[in-house]
Amino acid sequence: QVQLVESGGDSVQPGGSLRLSCKASGFPFSDYYVGWFRQAPGKGREGVARIAPRGNDPYYGDSAKGRFPISRDNALSTLYLQMNTVTPVASGMYYCAADTILTTIRNGGPGWAYWGQGTRVTVGS
């Protein structure tokens, strides 16, 4: 069956870095758009970034532009989010999602077909 398993979440100090991973299985990963979403405590889900099947055409939400590059390794069926110079605003549960068609990440990406269970990032002392 389709599985998306996130990892890499941790507690980190402001200014630090993390790399999140999302391992996919049960579907042809290289044919799918994939993306990252964040849900901060007490807030709705927001889109962070998404990337096209071939690894081109990355698109970022306002919170990630220029700081959290998204990438993928189709040979490993894995999606990544490199989180650099994090601030407490970056704290939350991070989810990866997949879909066969180009789907917006705006408004929390309600149209995405498949979702992982999430990995938690906490920034602060």
Image: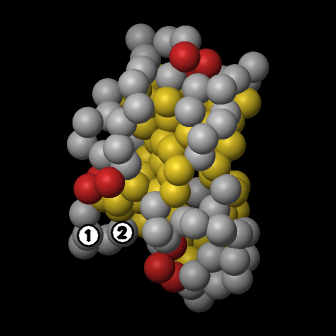
Q: Can residue 94 be seen in this view?
A: no
Which residue is pictured at 46% across the width and 61% down the height?
A: 61
Which residue is pictured at 42% across the width and 21% down the height?
A: 100
Q: Name the residue under label 2.
A: 40
Q: Nearer the viewer, residue 34 or 57?
A: 57
Outermost residue toward the bottom in this view: 125
| Amino acid type assigned to the residue bearing label 2 in the image | Ala
- What is the distance, in whole Å, between disc 2 and disc 1 at their CAs? 5 Å
| Amino acid type assigned to the residue bearing label 1 in the image | Lys
Confirm or deny contact between disc 2 and disc 1 (CB under 8 A): yes
Q: Is residue 44 visible?
A: yes
Which residue is pictured at 58% across the width and 26% down the height?
A: 53
Q: Mark 1 points at which residue?
A: 43
Taking the image as shown, residue 34 lies to the left or right of residue 46, namely right
User: On screen, 86 above or below 111?
Assistant: below
The quadrant in which residue 38 appears is bottom left
Q: Which of 48 and 13 is in front in this view?
A: 48
